[in-house]
Amino acid sequence: MLGLHIDPAAIIAVVIMLLVGFPVHEFSHALAAYRLGDGTAKLMGRLTLNPIVHFDPIGGLLLIISALGTGFFFGWAKPTPVNPMHLQGGRRGEAIVALAGPASNLIMAAAVAIPLRYIESQSVLPVPALAHDVMVVFVLINVFLFLFNLIPIPPLDGYRVLLGLIDPRLAWQIRPILEQYGFIILIVFLFTIGGTIISGIGLEIFHLLVGR
């Protein structure tokens, strides 16, 4: 899909993501960190579902543009502050905190997909078509953000997950390279094979959740 297409369902779903989805994602990071001993996010007022404190103008704008114009959803909220030195479990704890955000996106997608499966199983839609379409887009956005955030390239959550799972020596070796060139690698990846791969996997997960 090329060019901007003003889809009311996409607009509403993006607004819901900015007001609910992104805050839940960042709150999940903050809660996981707090449970593992790091109160940095709480001290900075980020252990909350208040969308205002989590809003990032650039990340929000990119979500709007991607939802209306590309068919591939990506964006972000303001990163949750975490002090790895305070986390229990060291690198594993850091990986858990990083994974909490994307996991929340998958949970939100599944939570909306369950009633969506029922709605689509009926011969006549029991809800307005716009509400159905908003649910579809909401599930898609969360599935894509789940996958997007798991890409193991900084500054995405998947990078911290990767560092927590691999051998410490290997992590020490690749960290400088990824942190220096990560953004460039990410852009090249997304605009070459990455976008196609994530789109394909995302649609498979969507069909699995929704049952079609």
Image: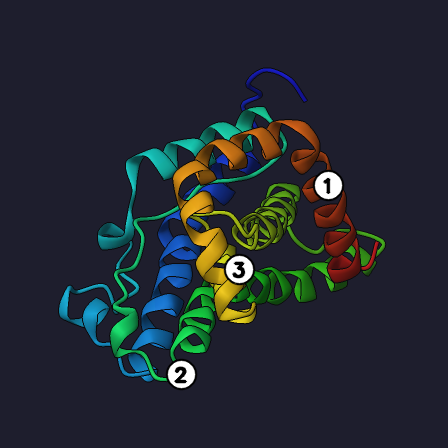
- Identify the disc placed on residue 105: 3
Along the line of sight, the residue nearer the viewer: 5 or 31: 31
Q: Which color scheme does this rendered protein use? A: rainbow
Q: CA distance from mark 3 to mark 2?
A: 24 Å
Look at discs 1 and 2 and give the one toward the viewer.
2
Q: Residue at 64% across / 43% down in the picture?
A: 133
Which residue matches tag 1? 197
Look at discs 3 and 2 and give the one toward the viewer.
2
Q: Residue furthest left?
A: 43
Q: CA distance from mark 1 to mark 2?
A: 33 Å
Along the line of sight, the residue nearer the viewer: 139 or 77: 77
Which residue matches tag 2? 89
Q: Position of residue 80 (x, y in %)?
A: 30, 59
Among the 4 quarters of the image, the one containing residue 49: bottom left
Residue type pointed to by label 2 = Gly
Residue type pointed to by label 1 = Ile
Is residue 161 visible in the rendered image? The answer is no
Q: Earlier in the sequence, mark 3 or mark 2?
A: 2
The reply, left or right, for residue 182 in relation to residue 36 is right
Q: Residue at 74% across / 56% down in the picture?
A: 205
Residue type pointed to by label 3 = Asn
Residues at discs 1 and 2 in contact (Cβ within 8 Å):
no
Q: Position of residue 172 (x, y in %)?
A: 44, 60
Q: Position of residue 48 (x, y in %)?
A: 26, 67
Residues at discs 3 and 2 in contact (Cβ within 8 Å):
no
Image quarter where the N terminus lies is top right
Q: Is residue 38 above or below residue 83?
A: below
Along the line of sight, the residue nearer the viewer: 164 or 57: 164
Q: Earlier in the sequence, mark 1 or mark 3?
A: 3
The reply, left or right, for residue 11 in relation to residue 212 is left
Q: Residue at 29% across / 36% down in the picture?
A: 57
Q: Earlier in the sequence, mark 1 or mark 2?
A: 2
